[in-house]
Structures are given as structure tokens and as C-alpha cells.
Image (cartoon, helix red, strand yellow):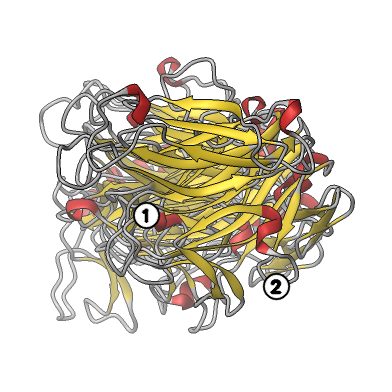
Amino acid sequence: LVQFYIQIGSKSSGLTCSKPKARNEGIVVQYTNDNGISWNLLRELDFLSYLEPQIISIELPRDAKTSTTAFRWWQPQHGRQSGQWALDDVLIGMNDSSRTGFQDRFDGSVDLQANWYRIQGGQVDIDCLSMDTALVFSENTGKPRYVETWDFHVMPSSSLQFELSMGCSKPFSDSHTVQLQYSLNNGRDWHQVTEECVPPSIGCLHYTESSVYLSERFQSWKRITVYLPPSTISPRTRFRWIQSSYGPGTDAWAIDNIILSSGCPWMCSGHGVCDSGHCVCDRGFGGAYCVPIAPLPSILKDDFNNNLHPDLWPEVYGIERGNLNGETIKSGTALIFKGEGSRMIVSRDLDCMHTLYIQFSYKFITKGVPERSHSVLLQFSVTGGITWHLLDEFYFTQTTDILFVNAPLPAAAQTNATRFRLWQPYHNGKRDEIWIVEDFVIDGNNVHNPTILMDTFDYGPKEDNWFFYPGGNIGLYCPYSSKGAPEEDSAMVFVSNEVGEHSITTRDLDVDESTIIQFEINVGCTTDSNSDDPVRLEFSRDFGATWHLLLPLCYSSSSHLNSLCTTEHHPSSTYYAGTMQGWRREVINFGKLHLCGTIRFRWYQGFYPTAMKPVTWAIDNIYIGPQCEEMCNGHGSCINGTKCICDPGYSGPTCKVSTKNPDFLKDDFEGQLESDRFLLVSGGKPSRKCGILSSGNNLFFSDEGLRMLMTRDLDLSLARFVQFFMRLGCGKAVPDPRSQPVLLQYSRDGGLSWSLLQEFLFSNSSNVGRYIALEIPLKARSTSTRLRLWQPSDNGHFYSPWVIDQILIGGNISGNTVLEDDFTSLDNRKWLLHPGGTKMSVCGSAGDALVFIEKASTRYVVTTDIVVNEDSFLQIDFAASCSVTDSCYDCWKNAVKCISIFYAICYHCYFLNNTTFFLLSFCFCSFACFSYFHHGNLRKII
């Protein structure tokens, strides 16, 4: 081979380097084998074809390949007026057969001439970053800076590796790049080693960048392994790295550790250096193919609220972390891809052998219709970034809303070392065709997922339990005494002034019909009940693509039937503000929901822009997993499915009653609602806004949200009745026909399940007060039974109010044989109802009496149930219309009338075991005149 640069004349007609005019002013290249006695033609260079510098490569004929060959460049016609010419960079040499590879560390161990045909603008020097010798290009020659190899034999198994650094940590113009090129004709023509392939191109194997290296991606040393395409395969292929343009005194670059080799399997998987056909693996990788020595992490998640960690994201370009125009995408900050140069983010390598999906929130913003090449590509690499495969393409012709992207992983991506990247090949520059990413997750397991999730948030959330909790922070919330926890107990709190989404989402869990979900929740602390911004407990079977309420609203109306509903009536898993003035434990058994498989759960309140301030809420002590024995009977917290932490008053492995529950409950709602009577009062307050039902205040249910009254656990094993006054609707107008009924239910397992006792329907006449008395059925009698009144609602909105008053739960199925009382104290167990009555001294009585002096629509007193037989008698002291003096109203004239009334009562109750005596206030009689009163004597009087 003879190779050289030549220029004959120039295009200009100046005094120097004048333009040739005749053929004889051309250049003849010749050789001689006899020391110049005879000359043989190699090539004639036309006088008008080389007006600019060109490289000439001439293959030597066989006759020129001798041990005594000389060459000459000869211009037949020359002189003062003839064309001038110049010759440079003459190369005579090279073997007929090329080497298959080389390696150069630029450490002086190998002569530069052995591997490099030419180095222009560079020299071996100490690099500023590595503090090791490298080939550094920093000279300002005014010519392109490049390094060019000799010809090498490139085979299908050949690969090229090198390390590149650009800028030396100094500013480097984005327009100045370094290109990797190859030539098959001794450097006459050059091509990119890797041609760019971006949408909508077809015919290329993968979407990829070209072998043009931008400075912003090489601010520090980075190794590049190049898959040599078939076009580079030849017996004589040479390579060069060239910087065509650069600024004066700037844009320096360096190259080091260049290896052209063949025979390394899988190109060392992108995690090693190919040395003489063997892989020298990076740290953490080993074996013949450079595979991970220990399993890599299998999960990657990032909400981008903090600075990007280089261990998670080793390559990040064209990104800002923040909120575009102050707009929150999900919560906190997001990744905004709006740089003028490259826009790309590359993940670390992950063990994706069993990974199922990639998920993230995505938004695309554009001013016009973008070209297809401006789309965003989601790609994966199983070769350490050498080659990239398309997973998904996001191309939008206009601005999009926030999208939830769920990209299933193909089998080709499920390897023990897979990395991912988001890459936008082209864009219209800064502030256009912007895209935003938040809440990035690579997860899922096609073998098995965890079956247990448990988190107390005492030392922050256990990150392995959760995907994300936007809007949530660990803190203290509401009186912790209400949940029996110490004051320093912390929870996941979602404060109202946090902008964006308020939710917390579990990772995927494997559940079955024995799984329970148990948690404590507090929505609004002490706020009043309302339907604004409730928290919904939801589940997803499709990795978060769609969400459904875990508990649907279930009741008898045919319009609300759901496949997840059984015969039980219950509210949905929607938690409204003001439901409880404190913390509330919820336990949901999956047995009645028929849920199994891979499920994720979330507590979701909503998305709130800056101006909106939803109610604050908190969640704590979450457990999802196998149920404990008998589910702790609803009176304890289940731990890992093996241990019950019982509530006060309950003990044992399954939290049985250890302290006897009350067997009687009475409330007239005149004072504060007592927590020792009712576990939950929601949607109702003591009031007279709906009139007086019996006397004084009643419990008026008019608020939005959840309308429910739930008693504490009671010992109803011997109880007989539940009774109360009720009005469905308020005022003279008939209730709205769309109003849902009020359900009376009971539970024997601490509220885990509920059975229907009675349903009260709204009707045209339901707004008239009614006295309801129901016998407690045998199946509701237990030592730990609670009752509740509940009005169903789809969304926390109601069409009509309702009231309840004078609720009584108790009695005795055996009955009492004796009732005796001198009213030293007013025993509510004996006197169930006494509207208008109070205990005080009157009419000169020796002690207190039951005095009917207060305002009531009707004044009366009702006893508890009493066993009445033929030997029973009634004896009372009675006075009416008296002052505090000793005078007493004489009622003898009404005696016959009063006695007749009591006779009628006793006569009709003669054969009854239990009788409730009902004394009406219009009967002003004094039975103090009689020493005794029974059936026989009454007949004598009549």
C-alpha cells in the first residue's frame, strides 16, 4: 500500500499555488525495482481533480512488492507558471494480511506506531480525571483532531471497547462531538460505525443512537462497548475517532484503554473487558460471561422527591427535578425532561428474572404536532447497555393528561442483569415537547409475592411494604389515648395543606380467603361528620391499572347488589371525616370477598391542587396477612396471624370476655354522648331541631358522611328487648322517596360481621314519631353483643334526616318477681322511661320521690318487665297538684275510675308471666289509702 495526501494547485488564481492548466502539470506516481534505471506507472493524478487536499491509497501490484522498491512523485511539466503541488503524510507499507485486534492503554508498553496510522492534535499525557496516561486531544492545530488505526481484520465475533472522556470537567460545546467511524478502503471513505435508528425508521434491528458521542454524556470517564455491525466486517477495516470542530482552547477530550478483540462470548455481557478472547469482569460480576456473582436488587422505585441517587440512576441527562409551572403531577417533585441536549435516564442493572412490570406516571406537553422521531422510548438492555430493545413507545400528537403507564416485561427482559432507560431521540429544544415522569416502579414477581405486610410506622415506614405514599409523612396525630397507645406513637399522617395526591399504596401481595386486613384510621380527628374528601380503601388485581372498593356498599336494595356482596349488609370501605372522635380499628376478612391471588391495596383520598385543603387523616398499625385464631373475636389486634393482642376486658388466645360486659344500656341523649355506652356516633348530634320526640333532646341524624350509632359490647345473654323512639323524616313534609332505610343490626364478634335485626323504611307516614320495641332474638344473645343503627349511602349524601330517642337495651328473659323502690336513687334498670320525671323531694315527702315536673309531650313512667301472677299486687304512694306544703290533692272521687283502669290492666295480664306497668299522668289517684292492692281486693272495692 502507498497512501498519501496531495493537492495540485488550488481553486483560486493567486500568485501562490496557482491552478494547473495542462495535463502535463498533473502528477505521476511511479515505482522502480532497479534503483531508478526504469520506472513503472502506479497512477496518474489528473491535474484538475486535486485542487483541494485529498487522500490517495494505491494497492501495490505484485511486481512492486520487492525488497528493493522505490517510489517517486513526478510532475512532467513544471516551471514558474506551472501548477504547484504539495505532498503530505506519506505511508508506504502494511502487510497483505491484517491483524485481528489490538489493545492500547497508552502507558508506554506498546509503540504508538504499532497500532496507529495517524494521531493528529493529540498526545499521550496524564488525564485530569483519571490521573493516568491517556491519549489526550487538546492541541489547537486548526485541523480536525483524530486518531486513526491501521487496517485490521474484523470478523463477526469482533467487538470494540474504549473509554472516553470529554471536557475534562470543563465546559464543552454541545455542538462539538467525537465520532467513531470506520473505513473499508484505506481511509478514503468513512462511515459511522453505528448508524442512528429512531422512529419511524424501519429495517433497523433496534432503535439506537449513532456512534456520535455528545460531551454531556462523557463528563467523566465512561467505557463504551460497540457491537460491530456486519458492514464493518472485512479483512481491512480501519477505525478513527475524530473531532471535526472545536473551540479555541476548549473542547478537549481523551481516549484510553482501546481494545479491538474477538472471541469473547456475549461481549462480556457489557460488564467486563475482552482481553485476548477472555473476559476480565467488573466488580460484582464473574464467570466466563461476566454475570452477577450475587443477585442484584430486583426492585427499583423512586418518587423523585429527593435528589437522584447515582446508584439507582447512573446516567441522567436533560432533566430537572421540580414542578413545571408550579403544577404538581402526583406529590412533591417530579422529573422534568426539558433540556436542550440529550434527554435520557438510565437505571441500574436489576435482577428481573421474575419481574413483571414497569410503572410510572407520565405527562407529555407540546405546542404543536411533534414528529414521530420526537417520541419517548422505553427500552431495556440485557447487555449492560451495549444494545437496547424497545419495550414501549410514547408518541402523542398533543398534550396529554397524567397517564398511568403499566408496561409488562417480556420474557427477553427477564434476566439476572437488566437495565432500563427512557430516551427521547429528538425534540424542538428547551420548553417544548417536554415530558414528566413520577413514581417510577420496577417490580412484580411471577413466582411468589409476600403474604404478610405489617407496619407500625414507629421508625418510619418500612419501604419494602409500600410503593409510594404521596402527601404522607410520619408524625403524631390526634389524641393517641383513644387508641390505647403511648403519646409518642407515630403514624402516617396526610396533612391537609400538602399539595397533590393523598394516598398510600402497598406493594403486591399474595392473598387468599384466610387473609385479613387490619388497620387503625383517623379521619378529621374531632371534626364534625361530613362527606367531603373521604378516604377509600381500594384494591387492584391488575397491578394498579384499575381500582375498586375493597368493601362495596352492600344492603338489600336490588340497585346495590355487587358480586362481592354476600347476605351481610355493611357499609363500603369508605371512611368519612368525623366518623369517630379519635382512632378506629378496622378489620376486614377476605373470606366473604372471595379475593385471592396477587393484589395491591391503597388508601386513597384524592388529588388536591394548591387551593384545596382536604381534611387531615392518618393511618397506623397496618397488618395484612393470615388471620389469627377466631380473628381475635373482634376484640384484639392480630400479629402475624399467630398472636392476638387483646383489648381491655378481653383475654386469652382468642380474646374472650374476661370482664363481664354491662347487660343494660339506656340513653335519653340529654347530656354528652358517653363513650362507655357507644363506640361510634357519626352523623348525629343531640338536638331538638326535629322537635321533641319523647322529651328533651333526641339524637338527630342530619349530617353527611356516615350515619351510624353503634353501642359498646353488651352482655345480652339474658336480655329481652331493645326499644326506642324513632322518626324517619322531619317536619310536616313527607320524606324524600329516594331515602335509604335505616338498618338495625347486631354483631357477636366485635363488629367483624353483622346480621340484620330490623329494617326501617322511609314512607309517607314515617315522619310521625313511633315507639319501637323489639324482642332480642336468641341468635343475638351472647356475652358480647353490640348493636348498631346504620343508614346506607353511596357517597355520604342523604335525602332525609331521622331521629332516635330513649334507647333502651336490656331486660331479663326470666323477668323480675319484685319491684320495690323508694327513689333514694333513680334506678334506670327498674324505671325504663319516665319522660318529664325527675327525682326530688315534694309534697312534704320524707325522702325523694319521682316527680313529674319537667316539660314533656306526655308524662309517664314505665317499669322494667315483671313476672305477674295471681298473687301479685301493686302498691304506690301518689300525690298530684301539690306544692311544697303539706296539703295534698284529694282524689277519692276518681278512685273508681283509676281502680278500673288498673283492674283492666291486671285482668288482661293475669295469665302473663311478664307485665310492664304503665302509669298515665291523667290518673290522679292515691293508693296510699289502701294497705294492699291485688286482684281479689280490687273486686271487692268495685
Q: Position of residue 17 (x, y in %)?
A: 25, 44
Q: Quadrant of residue 6?
A: top left
Residue 204, horizontal then vertical, whole percent: 55, 21
Residue at left offset 32%, top offset 73%: 849
Foreground residue, 668 or 413? 413
User: What crowding class fits label 2: few (fewer than 14 Cα within 10 Å), some (14-19), or many (20 or more)?
Assistant: few
Instruction: State the SS at label 1.
Output: loop
Q: Residue at x 52, y 68 (%)?
A: 123
**Residue 416, horizontal then vertical, whole percent:** 76, 46
Query: Could you tell whether 411 is left or right of 675 in the image?
Result: right
Q: Which residue is mark 2?
A: 108
Hey, which residue is sitting farthest right in the picture? 287
- Which residue is painted at 30% across and 47% down in the image? 607
Which quadrant is home to the C terminus? top left
The residue that label 1 is drawn on is 579
Between 531 and 848, the one nearer to me in the picture = 531
Which of the numbered marks, if any, corresponds to residue 137?
none
Q: What residue occupies the far front of the structure in this picture?
A: 37
Nearest the camera: 596 or 148? 148
Closer to the N terminus: mark 1 or mark 2?
A: 2
Cα separation between marks 1 and 2: 80 Å
Amino acid under label 1?
A: Thr
Answer left or right for 470 relative to 835: right
Mark 2: which amino acid?
Gly
Q: Secondary structure at mark 2?
A: loop
Q: Is residue 589 visible?
A: no
Find residue 132 and report its horizontal and vertical position in percent: 61, 77
Residue 27 lies, with reference to residue 116, above or below; the image says: above
User: In this view of the protein, can residue 80 be seen by the observer?
Assistant: yes
Q: Is residue 236 left or right of residue 529?
A: right
Estimate how packed mark 1 is, as few (under 14), some (14 to 19) or many (20 or more) residues with alpha carbons within 10 Å: many
